[in-house]
Image (cartoon, rainbow, N blue to C red):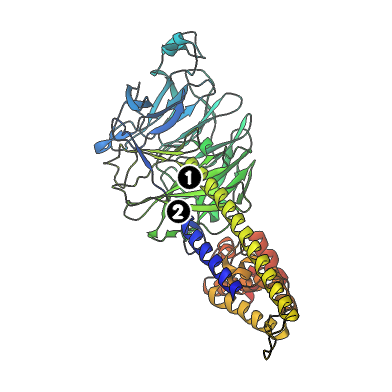
Amino acid sequence: MRLVRLFSLLLLLLCAFSVVLPARDRDGGGCPVVRIVPERLPDMTMPRSGHNIFYAGGELTVVGGHTTNFVTTQTAEYFADGLWHLLPTAYSHDNGFAVVMQSGEVIIGGGHSESLGIGQTFHLERYHPSPLTSNPSSLTSHPSPLTSESYPAHSFEGFGCLDHRRVLGNATQLGDGRVIITGNHYAEDAIGCYDGRSQVQHIKEVKQGRTNPYILPIARDEAVIIGSRDLRDRLHDTVWADRVKGEPFRVPLLEEWKLVPTDQPFSSTACARGDNGYLLTAQDKTGQLAIVMMRDTVFSLLPTSCPIPMKSPFGPVFYKGPIVVDSLHKRGYVMGVDNLYRRQYVLAVDYARQPAELTLYHTDTLEHATITIPIVTPEGDLILAGGIPCDNYKPLSAVWLYRFTTMAAEAEKGTAVAAWIWWILAAIAIIAVIGCVAVMMLRKKRAEVVPAQGEADETEDFQTLDLTKERSAELTESICRLMDEEQVYLRSDLKMQDVAVMLSSNSSYISECINNNRGQSFSQFINTYRISYAQELLRSQPDMKMAIVAMKSGFSAEVSFFRNFKAATGMTPREWLASQ
């Protein structure tokens, strides 16, 4: 009885300990859902949308865009000493592009010629930021790397002309120093090159005109150019990728998974993984989001621990724009909003893990959530500056800081504390068991030496440690009931230990039951249920993409789904569907 009481006390301690640990809700698909409280930074001097945001000279800087009433603004501002400082620019750049050069200067080009998002421009200018140097004299002026002239810090210089009038184009600097420029909206598209001269030179025509394309360097003098929308905002049926030097090539994956479009300027290099690869956001025709990987000219889907959640406990999630990558911490972030633009979502993708782990962060209700492209700070946090809640005529001036590095440090600290507490509880449990066994042995010895007259020997009824045939059948029935009723096999990360914990058993018993009573290994047993579930999906929704069927059925990767399906049925999923 004392042993029972002691274990009851330990159970209460464990329950109390679990209450202290940080709670992580889960959505229906198994993705952790975590509340985050963003920090409000000082507002920009004016509301902005369609602006570029970047770090130059170590300072957070925004350039151009349009302000209230959809009016273009010929201004920029940088954040220093806790304040935003307004600057005049040479031209206005609403939905233009910006490239932070290897020299530290910034090339800015294109944009609407008029307010209300009308027209395109040839505008090209250079921004001279505050240089990061300890030389006091260089804090006020410095020479341009392309000329012998010196320019004041925080100054803009109009110096050249684009090859085409452009808006909603993009630009990226290659390793050889050239800046590649392409993309347009309601105007002619081509590939241009800025190599230090005042004029942008025409390189070649494009196979496919694009609005807001990605320009992804794959070599010192080569880049892949892709996009989801044509020059008139229509989705491409057949997706081609252009190259700066090489020939265009078709990308079938992007015909099933369309790249998520954005109306906001963004930097293609923001999605670089840091290992010569890139991450891109894409959706199928049902609206399901996925992450596409690109390395060299190969495109594939990033395996994730669970399907990307399209809803939260508060309602549907609408993801907007590209993924931005923190290559130092190997994490990507996709922004989202709710249907009322009152709650901000951030999907975090830990791509260093295989499969990639997902976490959906959400804010409490805000006055306005925003649609804009975030920027990763040097510390690995996110900043959202301006953007629109849902109306281009009423952009925001608010600036929010999401401290993901602080949350990660706190989570790591909590994990370390939790580990220590678990070790302490385990030590207490072991000492308690040893003490109880010692007391029982002492009592038994005393009873044998001095038996009480007229009393029968007291015995304890202990369960055998062997799994009897009856117990094996009962446990097998419980395992099957767990699969049928709870559908835990839909979790791609399900392990034998998880099932053992759910049934208050152990992994050895679970394995023995499945081997003896089902003639299968644990993975074969689980995959049998997954394949059966996949067959039901194929029957009810024959047009569903196989990658979605695989994820919804609990497989961590499409290739694993195909391999196990054919091993079980002798046919591929499509062959099986055709035979029904």
Q: To which quarter of the image does residue 249 belong?
A: top right
Residue 107 relative to residue 303: left or right: left
Q: To which quarter of the image does residue 305 belong?
A: bottom right
Count neighbours of disc 1 (C-alpha within 10 A) and say few if under 14, some if 14 to 19, many if 20 or more.
Answer: few
Residue topped by disc 2? 34
Q: Is residue 62 above or below residue 29?
A: above
Circles 1, 2 touching at the beta carbon (< 8 Å): yes
What kind of residue is marked 1?
Answer: Met
What kind of residue is marked 2?
Answer: Val
| N-terminal-most mark, 1 or 2 | 2
* Identity of the residue drawn at 64% across and 69% down: 573
Looking at this rendering, what residue extends furthest in the bottom direction? 454
Residue 233 relative to residue 515: left or right: left
Q: Is residue 115 above or below residue 492?
A: above
Looking at the picture, how far across and down is residue 359, in whole percent? 50, 52
Looking at the picture, how far across and down is residue 535, in whole percent? 60, 73
Residue 232 relative to residue 412: left or right: left
Looking at the picture, how far across and down is residue 145, in whole percent? 52, 14
Quarter occupied by the C terminus: bottom right
Please tell me whether mark 2 sits on a helix, a strand or a loop: strand
Please tell me whether mark 1 sits on a helix, a strand or a loop: helix
* Closer to the camera in the image, 488 or 267: 488
* Closer to the camera in the image, 571 or 553: 553
* Closer to the camera in the image, 237 or 318: 318
* Identity of the residue drawn at 67% across and 60% down: 559
Looking at the picture, how far across and down is residue 76, in whole percent? 35, 26
Distance from Cα at disc 1 to Cα at disc 2 = 10 Å
Residue 231 relative to residue 501: left or right: left
Residue topped by disc 1? 407
